[in-house]
Amino acid sequence: MGTPRQTQIPPLELPRYGAERLSGIRCLATQLKIEPPNEAALTAMAIQRLDSLVMITLSGAGFERRGGGATGYVKHAYLAHLVPHPEANWTVSPPTDLDDLAAQDFLDLVENLEAEFEREYVAQQVDRDHDQVLIVGLMTDERKSQRFQDGLVELTRLVETAGGTVVETLTQKRSRPHPQTVVGEGKVQEIALAAQTVGANLIAFDRDLHPAQVRNLETQIGIRVVDRTEVILDIFAQRAQSRAGKLQVELAQLEYMLPRLIGRGQAMSRLGGGIGTRGPGETKLETERRGIQRRISRLQQEVNQLQAHRSRLRQRRQHREVPSIAIVGYTNAGKSTLLNTLTNAEVYTADQLFATLDPTTRRLIIQDAVTQEPRSILLTDTVGFIHELPPSLVDAFRATLEEVTEADALLHLVDLSHPAWQNQIRSVMKILSEMPITPGPALVAFNKIDQVDGDTLALAQEEFPQAVFLSASDRLGLETLRRRLAQLVDYAFSSWG
């Protein structure tokens, strides 16, 4: 009883649900006005993938009912159903007599439609090994327009780095997020319809979601929903190479998942593969909470042991009085490329976010700033920072980030070719300011100057007159950098002494 929108069945509860199949349900509805079914009814039909929707209209005349109320005879009926067409989601027949409608062979109609959907689906989806991702961005009052756009671009890069393909991006502007579904009810319907139209099998939001919001969205849309943190965790799970990195990733994933275990219901099948489901030492979500908490405690102990081990290594370095410099910066700023260029290291590099996770330390010979004698320093490539780094990752990667706080000085590398380079500097400085131990003095170096115009270069030189400008890939400005690193080490040791 009610309109197709009011009586909508959650996609996960439909008899069958698939991109090339109809749901197996035919819907019969009535309305008082003699007009075709409205947009809301047709959208509900599309989201539920109904076999067909028959809308019966009343004539408005008929027997008088005691107490009044709507009466009438059946005037006409409209037959609506989905069509596998790139420019139209459905078709609606002209007003049809009931006799003609009764003569319709619905089984034949449905079988033909499904055969068309199957052909269209196979033609559309060539590669199903990758997640087909629909990105949803919400712009609220506290987000500036440029920051919002930069965030969407960054989420697109994150999804691509995780191995997904972004097929569409939807945005909404609201004063604040909806408490149940982040976006409004109408937008949820639009997302569900868009996901169906473009063949998306994953929805990624540009913000962190509460467990209840994920459950509500998955129930209404019918496909998996992840937030920004889950995409980042998935990248970390793929990139971690060392035992330390894998331990820390698993710890971060478990701490993130623990509050999200209650009531996942259908979504417990999320371990099937794809973004948000991978991880070294993967622990099944169906495991009891106590078991997962025990695992977290054990991982925490191992991470603490790693910290102690790294601390002993650092003490050994300090006794040798070898200065150490940590290369910090926003992800994809070119830290690994710079380390490789300066020290002939072979650290994995790629034009991706978080290409390297495990800290790598290499020795570099420079000329002492005072005596001009050759001098050894240690350069450490650290994990890339990102705007609003998930708290679970900051905690789990303490051992990695300690390389930053324990270094004698920092080399803050900035990707000058990125349109949001100023925001990226602020994000890195914010994370550094929240470290438990204040890091040492920092030298700012702008990378990728071969990819920027003169105006951007002039602006950076004006804002940061003491900075170094270089291109690690083209080996530009490296001699200046070595000289400034020698001065930085001299300054750090003199101020420390």
Image (spheres, grey):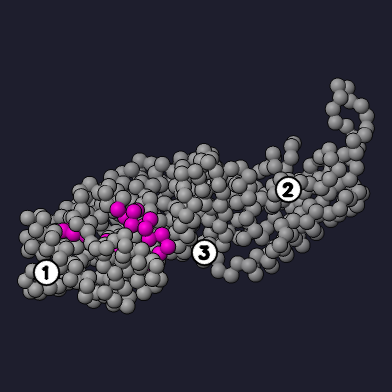
Task: Name the residue beneath numbered marker 3.
Answer: 165
- In magenta segment, residue 278: no
Secondary structure found at label 2:
helix
Extent of the magenta region:
407-429
Q: Which residue is drawn at 60% across and 47% down?
A: 188
Question: Is 68 left or right of 259, judged from the image as shown?
Answer: right
Q: From this view, report whether residue 291 is shown above or below residue 451.
A: above
Mark pair 2, 3: CA separation:
30 Å
Residue 497 picture quarter: bottom left
* Tag 1: amino acid: Ala
Residue 87 picture quarter: bottom right
Task: Name the residue beneath numbered marker 2.
Answer: 39
Task: Name the residue beneath numbered marker 1.
Answer: 369
- Spot occupied by residue 151 in the image (x, y as percentages of width and height): 45, 55
Q: From this view, report whether residue 373 is shown above or below residue 58.
A: below
- Spot occupied by residue 243 in the image (x, y as percentages of width and height): 27, 60
Q: Are there few (<14), some (14-19), or many (20+) residues within 10 Å of tag 3? A: some
Instruction: Kindly check if marks 1 and 2 are in contact, taking CB atoms under 8 A apart as contact.
Output: no
